[in-house]
Image: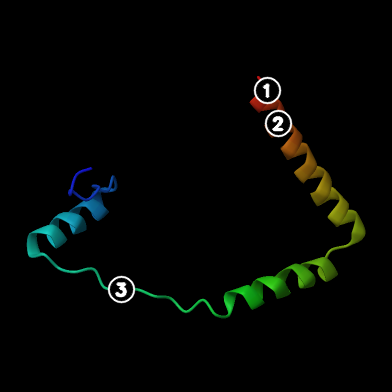
Amino acid sequence: MTDKPKRPRDANQLAKFIVDMATEDEEPVYDPDTSGQRKGGLKGGASRDKALSEGRKRQIAVKAATARWEKAKLKEE
């Protein structure tokens, strides 16, 4: 393997990459606080379940099942 870092494809990211390489700036370590995300995700499903009617839930389920079957058919071909 090489010691070269992978070059970004996006022109703006490439420009920043080149500037960082030329000035040898170190990337700041970004460690986001994700402590509340799981709790929020768990709440979201329950509140969506309460907000939707049975008929709408059925429509969503049928659409999802159809998409899964179409995906399976494409894999077989």
Residue 6: image x %, image y %? 25, 47
Q: Position of residue 15 (x, y in %)?
A: 18, 54
Residue 45 figure quarter: bottom right
Crowd band around label 3 with a 10 angstrom C-alpha radius: few (<14), some (14–19), many (20+): few
The type of residue carrying mark 2 is Ala
Q: CA distance from mark 3 to mark 2?
A: 41 Å
Residue 29 disc label: 3
Residue at point 19%, 69% (across, down) = 26
Q: Residues within 10 Å of mark 1 (few under 14, many from 20)?
A: few
Q: Which corner quadrant holds the N terminus?
A: top left
Alpha carbon of mark 1 to alpha carbon of mark 3: how far?
Answer: 45 Å
* Helix, strand or loop under label 1: helix
**Residue pointed to by mark 2:** 72
Picture quadrant of residue 9: top left
Q: SS class of the residue under badge 2?
A: helix
Question: What amino acid type should be assigned to the residue bearing mark 3?
Answer: Val
Q: Amino acid at mark 1?
A: Glu
Determine contact: label 1, label 3, CB under 8 Å: no
Q: CA distance from mark 2 to mark 1?
A: 6 Å
Give the residue pinned by disc 1. Answer: 76
